């Protein structure tokens, strides 16, 4: 045989084997008592089990998994696996039992699985916000609010918020924000006296308080007597001079 033909045949042989293996069932070794030989039997597909092993004369016989049983892979098992029973406390069914999949449980919203327990998602304290929300499998990831951002709440959902841009609103900053507090804006009052600019009511109140004459000191004994229950008696204050 010439060299070229030989190699072509080998290559052809390999590629045929590969394409053939792609859609043929995986195999398993089985000892056949009749012939006392190891046979290469076909496995059974997901959703089924081996009802009868192959023999020298017949292929493997597969049968579907009964209700509440499953096989999630090609297999050579003589029975399917039993689906897990009901989900635990604080869990709900994410996926029901089928012939090809076991029942899958997951933690209820707001909780994640840590070892065997569904723990509450961590809440990020003021000064930090949620960088990555928690899932049924993972806890919240918090981050410290970066420069220019703040969070004033304890929350497993809220991200850091941007400080209000006072100048963009036509105001100036009265109190600069930090990681737990927003900027507090104030009207630009450079031209007018500041006292009554913000809140008229507060301003009037302040003026009223100022207006009360301070030299009049109330007779505190009479006030006390007026507010006492029962018969009113007059109080005489004798001033010794
Ligand atoms: C947090 O800030 C927001 C907006 O600035 C405000 O409405 C809210 O009352 C604040 N919450 C707390 C707990 O301080
Ligand atoms: C605020 O807004 C102004 C004008 O819109 C902008 O030039 C400035 O960069 C902003 N400042 C911040 C801190 O975002």
Image (cartoon, rainbow, N blue to C red):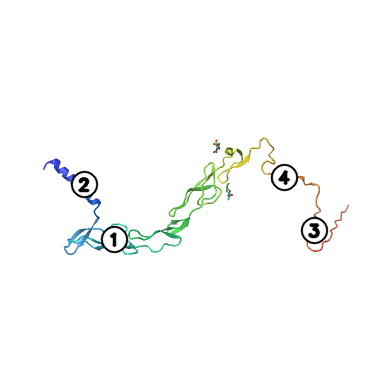
Q: Residue 178: give x, y in percent of width and height.
A: 57, 43
Q: CA distance from mark 2 to mark 4?
A: 95 Å
Label 4 belongs to which residue? 204
Q: CA distance from mark 2 to mark 3?
A: 112 Å
Contact? badges 4 and 3 (CB < 8 Å): no
Mark 3 or 1: the one toward you: 1
Q: CA distance from mark 2 to mark 1?
A: 30 Å
Q: Earlier in the sequence, mark 2 or mark 3?
A: 2
Q: CA distance from mark 1 to mark 4?
A: 85 Å
Label 3 belongs to which residue? 226
Contact? badges 2 and 1 (CB < 8 Å): no
Q: Residue 112: give x, y in percent of width and height.
A: 45, 55
Label 1 belongs to which residue? 48
Mark 4 nearby-residue class (10 Å; few <14, some 14–19, many ≥20): few
User: Hey, which residue is sitting farthest right in the picture?
Assistant: 241
- Residue 52 vertical placement versus 139 (above, below): below
Mark 2 or 4: the one toward you: 4
Q: Residue 75: give x, y in percent of width and height.
A: 28, 58
Q: Earlier in the sequence, mark 2 or mark 1?
A: 2
236 or 166, nearer to the observer: 166
């Amino acid at each position: 045989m010439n060299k070229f033909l030989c190699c072509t045949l080998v290559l052809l042989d390999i590629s045929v084997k590969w394409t053939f293996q792609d859609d043929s069932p995986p195999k398993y070794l089985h000892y056949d008592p009749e012939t006392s030989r190891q046979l290469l039997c076909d496995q059974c597909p997901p959703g089924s089990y081996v009802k009868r092993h192959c023999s020298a004369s017949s292929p493997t016989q597969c049968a579907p998994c009964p209700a509440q049983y499953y096989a999630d892979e090609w297999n050579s098992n003589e029975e399917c696996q039993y689906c897990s029973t009901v989900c635990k406390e604080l869990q709900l069914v994410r996926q029901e039992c089928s012939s090809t999949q076991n029942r899958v449980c997951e933690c209820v919203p707001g909780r994640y699985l840590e070892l065997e327990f569904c723990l509450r998602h961590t809440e990020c304290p003021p000064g930090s916000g949620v960088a990555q929300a928690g899932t049924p499998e993972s806890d919240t990831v918090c981050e410290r609010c970066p420069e220019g951002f703040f969070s004033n709440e304890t929350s497993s959902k809220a991200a850091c918020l941007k400080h209000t841009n006072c100048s963009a609103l036509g105001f100036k900053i009265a109190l600069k924000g930090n990681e737990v507090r927003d900027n507090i804006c104030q009207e630009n009052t450079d031209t007018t006296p500041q006292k009554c600019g913000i809140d008229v009511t507060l301003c009037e109140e302040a003026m009223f308080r100022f207006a009360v004459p301070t030299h009049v000191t109330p007779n505190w004994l009479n006030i006390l007597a007026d507010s006492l229950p029962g018969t009113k008696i007059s109080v005489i204050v004798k001033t010794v001079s």
